[in-house]
């Protein structure tokens, strides 16, 4: 057994911090959390000082195959598998050092993330615990087709693709429901699959006991995903050709089904680099959409889409909560939950990750300052533990 002391603790849920916490850890799990008081005799103690402890962050949407350059797509096209794997390993280390102790890779090439998943399971210091989707299921020349997950039109082909993914041993099925910004010739507001294909994807995934999450920007794609009974929606921006406008009936349906939306808002400030002008222009409308989703009671997860550009390196998630507070005007505690307990629940790990409580995995982040009053403090990393092992 070991104990970690700090100045205060955000447990992943509570608005009120625990003062002078001690977290007791055994075999990679948290066995008790106490405030002040005596520790059991003989337990080695690490006192981290005046820092704030919180759960290790959960990034529900990363792409470790991408190198976060201005053109991650061409780089990937010419790289061999070993080279891609070394990019993935570097991304995993970067993510872990920033406090991301759990990451869900929602689109690789050639199922390489399954190899990385095995490596990180054997060596907790090498990166986060990984959940993987393999290559995203898309249409022939649809969004991210170059990752190799393109299928013929029709529900049967979609079902076959889901089964193939399940046989490989993925943790989640990722479907590209609409076009996306990254792919030339693809339009974010336009659906790639119809309602029948989306239902085939969700049904087959569930038959294989896998959750399914759908990349969807356009309202029609979002509506089809909700009707199909998917487990999560990535982006969920309700983009139109030039703007964004939520359909209130669809928003109500998302809320009624309790489907979390992964808002991939985290950006790392890089001097001289800003959001793509198209996105910058529609930003006020996107903010309105997210506020409407939140008002309806939809769980909002803050994630990264790490890898797709220079503002989204693998260590970007910690910048997300401050952006959620700045853009949406939500309280810091809600933004912190969106990268911890709410994110963990959204990817099916709500009983293991995202909280500092007895029975949970001992994945901890310690930061200088108090993120409950200043979420920007999340990037002032002082220590990181994964499965009870100090990795930074
Ligand atoms: Zn993505």
Image (cartoon, rainbow, N blue to C red):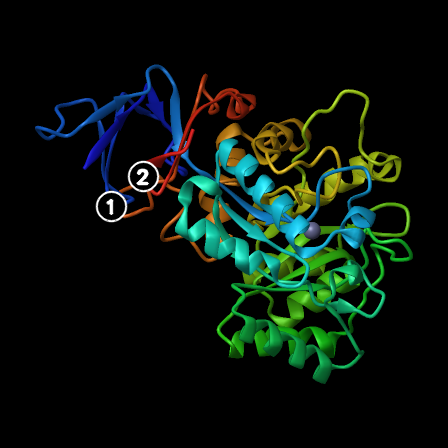
Horizontal arrangement in the rendering, residue 28 relative to residue 62 (left or right): left
In contact (CB < 8 Å): disc 1 and disc 2: yes
Residue 173, position as x, y percentages in the image: 60, 66
In the structure shown, which secondary structural element does the residue marked by tag 2 occupy?
loop
Q: Which mark is residue 371?
A: none
Find residue 218 and report its image quarter: bottom right
At x 40%, y 51%, the residue is: 122
Q: Which mark is residue 388?
A: 2
At label 1, counting other C-alpha atoms closer than 10 Å, the crowd grade (few under 14, some 14-19, many 20 or more) is few
At x 82%, y 42%, the residue is: 71
Q: Is mark 1 within 8 Å of ligand 1?
A: no
In this view, the residue in front, 342 or 85, is 85
Q: Which mark is residue 27?
A: 1
| Residue 259 showing in the rendered view | no
Find residue 326 and report its image quarter: top right
Q: Earlier in the sequence, mark 1 or mark 2?
A: 1
In the structure shown, which secondary structural element does the residue marked by tag 1 occupy?
loop
Q: Quadrant of the C terminus?
A: top left
At label 2, counting other C-alpha atoms closer than 10 Å, the crowd grade (few under 14, some 14-19, many 20 or more) is many
Residue furthest left in the image: 41
Q: Quadrant of the N terminus?
A: top left
Horizontal arrangement in the rendering, residue 29 relative to residue 232 (left or right): left
At x 76%, y 20%, the residue is: 271
Residue 178, position as x, y percentages in the image: 78, 61
Q: How many marks?
A: 2
In this view, the residue in front, 40 or 96, is 96
In this view, the residue in front, 117 or 60, is 117
Horizontal arrangement in the rendering, residue 26 relative to residue 10 (left or right): left
Residue 62, position as x, y percentages in the image: 62, 47
- Whole-angstrom CA distance, mark 1 to mark 2, is 7 Å
Find residue 14 and report its image quarter: top left
């Amino acid at each position: 057994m070991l104990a970690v002391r700090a100045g205060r603790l955000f447990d992943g849920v509570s608005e009120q911090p625990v003062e002078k916490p001690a977290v007791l850890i055994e075999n990679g799990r948290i066995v008790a959390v106490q405030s002040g008081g005596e520790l059991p005799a003989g337990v080695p103690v690490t006192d981290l000082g005046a820092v704030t402890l919180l759960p290790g962050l959960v990034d529900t949407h990363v792409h470790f195959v991408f190198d976060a350059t201005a053109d991650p797509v061409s780089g990937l096209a010419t790289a061999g598998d070993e080279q891609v794997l070394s990019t993935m390993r570097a991304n995993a280390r970067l993510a872990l050092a920033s406090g991301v102790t759990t990451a869900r890779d929602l689109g690789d090439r050639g199922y390489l993330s399954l190899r990385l998943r095995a490596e990180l399971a054997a060596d907790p210091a090498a990166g986060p615990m990984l959940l993987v989707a393999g290559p995203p299921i898309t249409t022939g020349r649809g969004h991210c087709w170059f990752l190799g997950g393109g299928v013929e039109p029709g529900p049967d082909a979609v079902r076959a693709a889901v089964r193939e993914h399940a046989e490989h041993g993925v943790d989640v099925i990722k479907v590209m429901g609409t076009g996306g910004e990254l792919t030339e010739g693809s339009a974010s507001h336009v659906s790639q699959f119809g309602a029948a294909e989306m239902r085939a994807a969700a049904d087959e995934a569930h038959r294989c006991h896998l959750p399914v999450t759908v990349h969807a920007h356009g309202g029609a794609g979002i509506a089809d995903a909700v009707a199909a009974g998917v487990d999560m929606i990535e982006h969920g921006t309700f983009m139109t050709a030039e703007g964004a406008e939520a359909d209130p009936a669809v928003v109500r349906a998302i809320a009624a089904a309790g489907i979390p939306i992964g808002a991939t808002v985290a950006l790392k400030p890089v001097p001289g680099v800003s959001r793509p002008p198209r996105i910058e222009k529609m930003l006020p409308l996107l903010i309105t959409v997210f506020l409407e989703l939140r008002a309806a009671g939809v769980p909002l997860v803050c994630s990264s889409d790490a890898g797709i550009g220079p503002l989204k390196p693998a260590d970007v998630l910690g910048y997300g909560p401050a952006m959620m507070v700045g853009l949406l005007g939500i309280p810091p505690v809600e933004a912190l939950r969106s990268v911890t307990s709410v994110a963990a629940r959204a990817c099916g790990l709500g009983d293991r990750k995202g909280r500092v409580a007895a029975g949970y995995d001992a994945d901890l982040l310690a930061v200088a300052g108090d993120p409950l009053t200043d979420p920007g403090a999340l990037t002032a990393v002082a220590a990181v533990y994964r499965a009870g092992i100090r990795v930074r």
